[in-house]
Amino acid sequence: MDEFVRIVMDNLGVFGIGLLMLLENVFPPIPSELIMPLAGYEASTGRMSLFAVIASGTVGSLLGVVPWYYAGHYLGERRMKRLALRYGRWLTLSPADVDKANSWFRRRGASAVLLGRLVPTVRTLISVPAGIAHMPMPTFLLYSAIGGAIWTALLTIVGFLLGQQYELVEGYVGPVSNAIIIAIAAFYVYRVATFDTGRLEEQRRAMEEDG
């Protein structure tokens, strides 16, 4: 994966950083924890401007979350609950869970987006409930940009400060990223295995009675 990131940066420069960060939000297995420290290292060698690297990464990251926002926006709460009713076990989600998540998001609003953009894996997914809750696009973009800029800048500066010692970051990031992916997969399997299908049937009957 790191070789692919290096090739894109070598061929496309600063524009490639933005492209990679956009892809990171659409295709999470390309982690920002690898992209931005490497970009910071490139900036430390003088090949790129530190400001340009952070700006490009932030813009690419912001563009990458917009499709997810619109997915939630057009899917809507009602369709999401229908999906939960039909595929609840595999989504590990019930209609009641959708109600709880939306209620929590409406209470937290902007802070949920800002803080969510600083958490691996959540960084992209937080856009979906924002869309479902119909958060105003300017508000969503503002807080997504702030959170994304903080995350991008932190990772870039780590790579920049370590300079020639970037190999230390690379050796650390790889195992951590793999551990996160494995943990997410294990948690999903656990959720599927322990999902309460009886509760889902009760909610299905209740929704049918309500019409």
Image (spheres, helix red, strand yellow):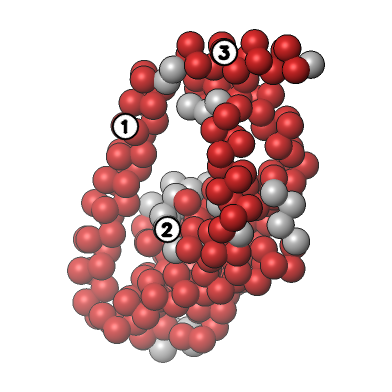
Residue wearing tag 1:
186
- Asked if the residue at tag 3 contacts the one at tag 1, i.e. Cβ–Cβ closer than 8 Å, the answer is no
Disc 2 marks a residue whose amino acid type is: Val
Residue name at image x 74 percent, y 52 percent:
134
Disc 1 marks a residue whose amino acid type is: Ala
- Asked if the residue at tag 2 contacts the one at tag 1, i.e. Cβ–Cβ closer than 8 Å, the answer is no
Disc 3 marks a residue whose amino acid type is: Glu
Residue 66: where, in percent of width, then height? 68, 56
The answer to whether residue 41 of the structure is visible from this angle is no
The answer to whether residue 120 of the structure is visible from this angle is yes
Q: Secondary structure at mark 2?
A: loop
Residue wearing tag 3:
202
Residue name at image x 31 percent, y 32 percent:
186
Residue 91: where, in percent of width, then height? 52, 27
Q: Report the Cα–Cα distance between label 1 and label 3.
A: 27 Å
Image position of 178 (left or right of 102)? left
Residue wearing tag 2:
119
Image position of 190 (left or right of 77)? left
Q: Which mark is residue 114?
A: none
User: Callout 3: 10 Å neighbours few (<14), some, many (20+)?
Assistant: few
Image position of 23 (left or right of 195)? right
- Asked if the residue at tag 2 contacts the one at tag 3, i.e. Cβ–Cβ closer than 8 Å, the answer is no
Residue 125: where, in percent of width, then height? 54, 48
User: Callout 2: 10 Å neighbours few (<14), some, many (20+)?
Assistant: few
Disc nearer the start of the sequence (3/2): 2
